[in-house]
Amino acid sequence: MIFLLLLGVPTALGHLYLWRRLVVDTTRPRTLGRRIGTLAVIGAFVLLMSALVVTRRVPPEYGKFFAWPGFVWLALLFYLAIALGIAEIPRRILLKRATLVPAAVGAEPVEVVPDPSRRLFISRSVAIGSGIAAGSVVGYGMTQALGAPQLLNVPVTLDKLQKSLSGFRIAVVSDIHLGPLLGRSHTERIVRMINEQEADLVAIVGDLVDGTVAELGEAAAPLRDLVSRHGSFFVTGNHEYFSGHEQWISEMERLGVNPLRNEGLTVAGGIELVGVNDIIGKSYGDGPDFERALAGRDRNNPLVLLAHQPVQVSDASSHGIDLQLSGHTHGGQMVPFNFVVPVQQPSVAGLSKVDDTWLYVSRGAGFWGPPVRVGAPPDITMIELRTAG
């Protein structure tokens, strides 16, 4: 309910703004066009709310019929509002000029009653231009979101890494978000891309699913085909807790992907791999526990942490972690949200350093909500560990 209020109120206001600019300003009062436009805006709002409500309550094979149109419209609504907002200043200038006529030389212009036809022309031109701009951005964003993830190669130097392990490669993938819009073929493509890299280890750092095992078990099944020299590992993201985390942890084990639940192990004889639960797990009695995860680990080896949210790096740094691998942010997914993410997280995407801890944040291989990515293409990252010097 809180979720719906947080998203429902601003989207309702957004629809009201669009109604004013796209319907009221572009049609004459009491005309058929205005009635049709008003009904269309109301219908779009109902469609969006249906996508938010229905897709959470029905199996993905049915939810997709609400999710596709509803979430695509959400992206259009967002970018239409931005385009119309940007166009507001020139629109007002043009409308003001439309109400003035020149006077004699040296005199002030005289304000007159605006010409309704001129006002309609200006408003319609702004509406059409904004619609073309928003549609183009969303269309481009859909090709990015639904296309193959970018394959990134990121070297990271660790002082404590043995020379014999220099070149050790970890395939990092996060935020796959299987659900009503992304299914088995999405997983198959990710598995194929990772296997082609012949990684030493695979790390899935949370938000694999948006639904239960009963609904999405078949979509996740290709993960059993992941191949690497030292195994595949998984830590929970916040969406696993919304989707039945205990069942998904069992399912990962069945598929041969090893969950790390506040625990660690030594990999390749010289890397301490550690995984902690997501922060939201605290609300489910399953929160992160660094002390437990690091118990028995050899501090002479580099400590590599899998943790879904970048913000966990504050705890990681205080516990001597050398490298944290995370996701969660989607890189902002749709500009300008990339400017909002830093309010909550220390990094939007890429490699950075917090005190003595390297932090790498993947943009994720899927998406949440709108099937749109603008300025934040999906990725799978090959982390190559290197020895200092």
Image: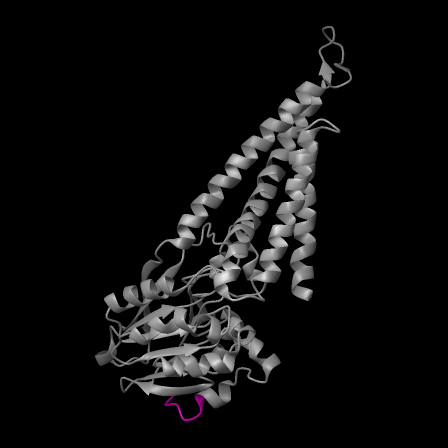
Q: Is residue 154 left or right of residue 211?
A: left
Q: Main secondary structure of the magenta part?
A: loop
Circle count: 0
Which residue, as the protein is rendered here, is positioned at the far bottom? 296
| The one of 242 and 231 positioned closer to us in this rendering | 242
Which residue, as the protein is rendered here, is positioned at the far top? 104
Q: Is residue 266 magenta?
A: no
x, y percentage for residue 274?
A: 41, 83
| The one of 207 and 112 positioned closer to us in this rendering | 207
Q: Is residue 98 left or right of residue 279?
A: right
Which residue, as the protein is rendered here, is positioned at the far left? 164
Q: Is residue 347 visible?
A: no
Q: Is residue 295 magenta?
A: yes
x, y percentage for residue 239?
A: 52, 71
Is residue 277 shown above or below 367? below
Q: Is residue 150 visible?
A: yes
Is residue 239 shown above or below 296? above
Q: How is the image coloured?
A: one colour
x, y percentage for residue 372?
A: 47, 52
Q: Quadrant of the C terminus?
A: bottom left
Q: Is residue 3 left or right of residue 367?
A: right
| The one of 363 and 69 positioned closer to us in this rendering | 69
Rendering quarter of residue 40: top right
Is residue 285 shown above or below 77? below
Magenta-drawn segment: 294-299
x, y percentage for residue 250?
A: 44, 83
| The one of 177 and 154 positioned closer to us in this rendering | 177
Residue plotted at (63% across, 25% down): 122
Residue plotted at (41% across, 77% down): 234
Q: Quadrant of the N terminus?
A: bottom right
Rendering quarter of residue 160: bottom left
